[in-house]
Image: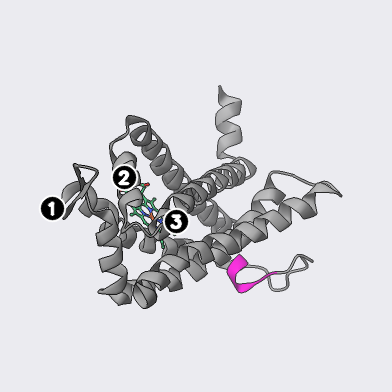
Amino acid sequence: MSWITNTLTSSIGRKATMSLTGLFLVSFLLVHLSGNFLLFKGDEGAAFNLYSNFMSTAPIIRVLEIGLLAGFLIHMITALMLTNKNKAARPVGYAVSNNNKKVTWFSKNMGLSGSIVLVFLIIHLLNFYFPYHYATMRYVNIEGEEYKDMFFLVATVFKQEWWYSVLYLLALVLLGFHLQHGFASAFQTLGIEHKKYTPIIEGLGNLISIILPIGFATMPLYFWLIY
Ligand code: HEM
């Protein structure tokens, strides 16, 4: 058993854990984005409300939620451990970096962009997740049955409390940079090096880092400025 513990607690093991949990979180974001597009169906939120009801009552989703929470926690705790280990090993830092990969401000500040995304996530859950599960909600009748009106809550937050829209847009820009650098280093860490496929995977990573923030940004923008 000790080789498993040794591998997982080694720097490369921790980096691999971060890469895999990061890719898992991205897969959640892709599903979350697709589901949220129901907001635009033009049916005053009926399909989105049915979807929200399914997402908060289906037992399989409860199990996936535990996996998701674990994914977030492992990703963040491993990041903290790696940062502390790196600082302890080199408290002063390199005077000159001879790494020929492009070093951007974002690639050096993944911890900062990640922490801001975490603050955004807490605000986001306070906006939607907690009210839906634990507060008194407005109900709406869909095909003869009463459902919590999540569509109304989303529309109200983004339109009436418009400063949330601004905050979401700023957080989404940071999420984009966090994903862009995260993808690049995840593939590097996992050792995916192939003359033909690496550029395709990298291109896909870049594309997802653009599609996710822009896709999510359409929602606050739509409710704030058009709805
Ligand atoms: C900006 C557009 C977004 C909208 C309109 C939106 C909407 C929602 C809604 C309505 C819920 C509650 C679902 C429920 O309780 O059943 C939710 C949950 C959640 N959102 Fe978002 N979201 C957006 C962006 C994001 C982003 C960018 C992230 C991550 C960085 C994120 C992460 C989550 C998580 C982790 C949950 C809780 C898990 C779940 O119940 O599915 N969301 N979102």
Amino acid type at mark 3: Phe
Crowding near pointer 2: few (<14 within 10 Å), some, many (20+)?
A: some
Residue drawn at x 53%, y 46% is 27
Look at mark 3 in the image and give the residue it sits on: 37
- The answer to whether residue 112 is visible is no
Left/right of residue 61 with respect to residue 95 in the rendered view? left
Q: Circle 3 — which element?
A: helix
Look at mark 2 in the image and give the residue it sits on: 50
Q: Nearer the viewer, residue 31 or 111?
A: 31
Q: Is residue 209 above or below residue 57?
A: below
- The magenta segment is 103-107
- Quarter of the picture containing the N terminus is top right
Question: Earlier along the polypeptide chain: callout 1 or callout 3?
Answer: 3
Amino acid type at mark 2: Leu
Q: Dividing the picture into quarters, in which one does residue 108 lie? A: bottom right
Mark 1 or 3: in front is 3
Rounded to the nearest angstrom, the CA distance separating label 1 from label 2 is 18 Å
Residue extending farthest to the front is 143
Confirm or deny contact between disc 1 and disc 3 (CB under 8 A): no
- The answer to whether residue 15 is visible is yes
Rounded to the nearest angstrom, the CA distance separating label 3 from label 2 is 13 Å
Look at mark 1 in the image and give the residue it sits on: 136
Residue drawn at x 27%, y 54% is 150
Q: Circle 2 — which element?
A: helix
